[in-house]
Every structure is written in structure tokens, then in C-alpha cells.
Image (tube, helix red, strand yellow):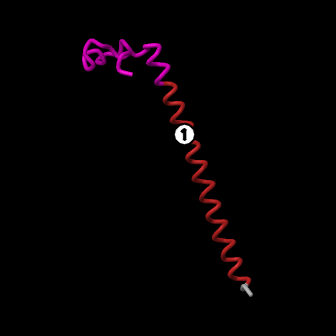
Amino acid sequence: MTDRRTINGIDEVMDWIRHRLQTFVALISIWGTLLFCAYAILDYEADQCHYRDIRGFDEVLGKTGWCRVL
């Protein structure tokens, strides 16, 4: 027969693993959302060419301009 302390110990370990897994999934979800938002903003800005006239970009990128980089 299994000792009750062993069952409680296993339950504590499983609770700890479950908590850590939930934290990991939440952090990955937040990171994915932020990454998607950053990509969407860059894609929109590149499409609109809002940053074309920022000083230094044309010199650094040649005369192709900022819009052609992305």
C-alpha cells in the first residue's frame, strides 16, 4: 500500500509542474502577441513609407530608400 506522505509529495510536485507550465504558456503567449504586433506595425509603416524622409536613412541605404528595405 502506498504511504499517504508519498501521495502528498507527488501531488505537490505535480502542482508545482502545473503552475510552472501555466506560467510558461502565459509568457509564450504574451511574447507571441508582442512579436505579432511589432511585425504588424513594421509591415504597416513599410507599406505606408512613413519613415522615408528620416535623416540618414537615404545615405545609409543608398538611394533605394527606406521603403525598399522591408
Residue 57, image x and y in percent?
31, 18
In-front residue for pair 16/69: 69
The 10 Å Cα crowd at callout 1, few under 14, some 14 to 19, many 20 or more, is few
Residue at position x 25%, y 15% from top?
62
Rendered view: 8 above or below 58: below
In-front residue for pair 63/53: 63
Residue 46, image x and y in percent?
44, 18
Compared across the picture, whether 20 is left or right of 65 comes to right
Residue at position x 54%, y 36% from top?
34
Amino acid at pointer 1:
Gly
Residue 33, image x and y in percent?
57, 37
Compared across the picture, whether 35 is left or right of 68 comes to right
Compared across the picture, whether 25 is left or right of 63 comes to right
Of the 4 image quadrants, the one containing the N terminus is bottom right
Report the residue that reaches farthest toward the front.
1
In what element is the residue under mark 1? helix
Rendered view: 23 above or below 38: below
Magenta-tinted stretch: 42-70
Residue at position x 50%, y 19% from top?
44
Of the 4 image quadrants, the one containing the C terminus is top left
Rendered view: 25 above or below 42: below
Rendered view: 16 above or below 59: below
Q: Quadrant of residue 56?
A: top left
Residue 9, image x and y in percent?
66, 77
Residue at position x 27%, y 19% from top?
61
Residue under label 1: 32
In-front residue for pair 28/59: 28
Q: Is residue 46 magenta?
A: yes
